[in-house]
Amino acid sequence: MTVTLADVAARAGVSSATVSRVLNGNYPVADSTRARVLRAVEELEYVVNGQARGLAAATSDLVGVLVNDIADPFFGIMAGAAQAEIAHGSPASGGTGGGKLAVVCNTGGCPKAELTYLTLLQRQRAAGVIVTGGAAEDAEHTRAVTAKLSRLATDGTRIVLCGRPPLPLDGDAATLAFDNRGGARRLTGHLLELGHRHIGYITGPKDRSTTRHRLEGHRTALAEHGLAADADRLTVGGDYHRHAGYQGACELLARAPELTAIVAANDTAALGVCAALRERDLRVPQDVSVAGFDDLPFSVDAAPALTTVRLPLHEAGARAGRLVTGREEVPPGGIAMVTAQLVRRASTAPPRAS
Amino acid sequence: MTVTLADVAARAGVSSATVSRVLNGNYPVADSTRARVLRAVEELEYVVNGQARGLAAATSDLVGVLVNDIADPFFGIMAGAAQAEIAHGSPASGGTGGGKLAVVCNTGGCPKAELTYLTLLQRQRAAGVIVTGGAAEDAEHTRAVTAKLSRLATDGTRIVLCGRPPLPLDGDAATLAFDNRGGARRLTGHLLELGHRHIGYITGPKDRSTTRHRLEGHRTALAEHGLAADADRLTVGGDYHRHAGYQGACELLARAPELTAIVAANDTAALGVCAALRERDLRVPQDVSVAGFDDLPFSVDAAPALTTVRLPLHEAGARAGRLVTGREEVPPGGIAMVTAQLVRRASTAPPRAS
DNA sequence: TTGTACGCGTTATCAC
DNA sequence: GTGATAACGCGTACAA
């Protein structure tokens, strides 16, 4: 039924070893035999069995990319960039085409699913694993993930953490840490400089590193202006989704009518904030300034264009892809900080004179 | 270095065959030995080698999910639902955890990448492949994809087409076809019923089946009201992105100031349309009605809430996942039509009195 | 209920 | 340059 190396060899009148050599291009083969073999491959529509190859060569062309929410462009952009970079590997001269298979795994932010996928990838002896997005901040889970990744790393699987705090692994690993704290601090600092003194904040999901870091940056900026006292009252929980922004804004307005600005933990939620404000006939930014985080593609184009913090998601994903394929060297210390840049746009302005 | 079945067997004082039986639960094993084996598995942190297992059993636990644009929630939602369903397989009693590995492959809408990924999946002897989203309408490419999928199907890989026109494959396959034509026709019909007579249209990318079907539905509705003549002038090209909606709206307004409604090929572009209108101080829907397609999560929550056509993306993705794992029976004829439901919301209203 | 032994399709190490 | 042949790690008749 399925064509094997032996079938091709028989057809070309050579040994299977020779066929293998032609396909992999590792050893010299006479041009005439090479031609015969390639023709047989064509005629039989032979396709390498990746499992057998992996077993024999102790390698795999699978690279896992773990994301928290595949429906969120934040992860889609990173995953897409990484995948393009990974698939872009040097093509085998055999004509079968080269490149590795990047497989995007959606954990849904569920710690258990994260471990399950890591085990599945471990089974496949994945060549590499990229773990993206904030980590669940649970001691037990962190321990389990660290152990699993350590094991993978020592077994030869390349590990890259992208947009996630570094982990003390046994083997080698690279971390692209996002400067969420710094970005959030500059963003809130921007609002403070504009003159805002009552700034609401809508967080991401609880117990995630990204959520905590962004909130900490926000609080740091407030503290620098002696405004820490009021922070708790002006902070409401969310989950990065648009609806959370909408509801959070409603809650904040009810709780603190004096506020003149709202910062959301990400752009998606910020759009929800804008929707809630519009519904109340509050103008952005004249009545209330709004800011997000991430600078997703739609943010430039929103009305008004959103002030936010730009994370170079595409670049970071691509770099993660190169790191995991060994096409780029691991940064010194294994950690590189990805800068978060304040992007001032139309959704923030000085507060209305009160 | 790496722990094998033999290592576990030695430690448990049994043969490797017994260990295999315990792990797969296919054959009866004495409780006492089972316990010993499982303990050895734990102690050695043994993880099955998926490649060797696949080679020996001629199976694979890999399922490919091809998407056109992973950064677009349209695909993210389908892929996420499919993946959840696929990973949700019956867990092996061995304790190693079960389920298949759903791998999302991002083609970027590039026909060549589509074929490359199919070949990569073929190499891995994937258990199944789900191809989502509109197909490139190029004769040569269609032929190539049909051949490749036929080959996969006859080799035992389950094929599911989700949101893509059916293909005449040699082997078995299931198709979940989206009623893009009917949905578009009802949507434009809705605007016509409201009294609109000058309706602009912003298409998706050229040469894609989804683009063509939605446009055809739109034209059909126009023709039913004797408005086909003006259709060409009121149609501009786009690519499903927000910016295309923005630019398309600008172009349409310049080209036909008399228009009272704009239909975008999808919700994302429709938001761009709204942004362009707001910039010109045109109110939605009082001055211009706007409609989209897909009913993505953000559409309810937009301002004003978007009239659109709901595609049950989550359900379709989940169903595709069940079909590809054989957990749901293939519909009669291999094709099931996924209905597209008109969702009337605040962005459409009767045209202003002219 | 358990062990033995072979085969799955490749790669890689020898010889020739 | 090319051909045998031994791994690679596991599933599974077959035998015990």
Image: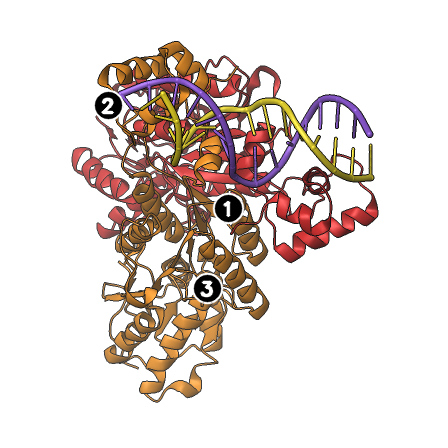
Chain colours: A red, B orange, C purple, D yellow
As measured in the structure, the alpha-carbon distance from the residue carrying label 2 to the one carrying label 3 is: 64 Å
As measured in the structure, the alpha-carbon distance from the residue carrying label 1 to the one carrying label 2 is: 51 Å
As measured in the structure, the alpha-carbon distance from the residue carrying label 1 to the one carrying label 3 is: 18 Å
Identify whether B193 is placed above or below A280: below
* Residue A266 image point, x, y percent: 37, 37
* Residue B166 image point, x, y percent: 41, 66
> Which quarter of the picture shows residue C11?
top right
Residue situated in front as seen by the camera: A298 or C13? C13
Q: What is the chain identity of the residue bearing mark 1?
A: B
Crowd rating for badge 3 (residues with CA inside 10 Å; few <14, some 14–19, many 20+) = some
Q: Amino acid at mark 3?
A: Asp
Question: Residue at 53% of width from left, 28% of height from top?
Answer: A338
Question: Residue at 53% of width from left, 29% of height from top?
Answer: A128
Residue B121, numbered circle: 1
Question: Residue at 43% of width from left, 51% of height from top?
Answer: B156
Identify whether B130 is placed above or below A108: below
Residue A232, numbered circle: 2
Please give the residue where the numbered disc 3 appears in the rendered image. Answer: B170
Do badges 2 and 3 share one subunit? no
Crowd rating for badge 1 (residues with CA inside 10 Å; few <14, some 14–19, many 20+) = many
* Residue B269 image point, x, y percent: 41, 60
Q: What is the chain identity of the residue bearing mark 2?
A: A
Identify whether A9 is placed above or below A195: below
First of labels 1, 3 by sequence position: 1
Residue B146 visible, this angle? yes
Q: Are marks 1 and 3 in contact (CB under 8 Å)?
A: no
Q: Amino acid at mark 2?
A: Asp
Q: What is the chain identity of the residue bearing mark 3?
A: B
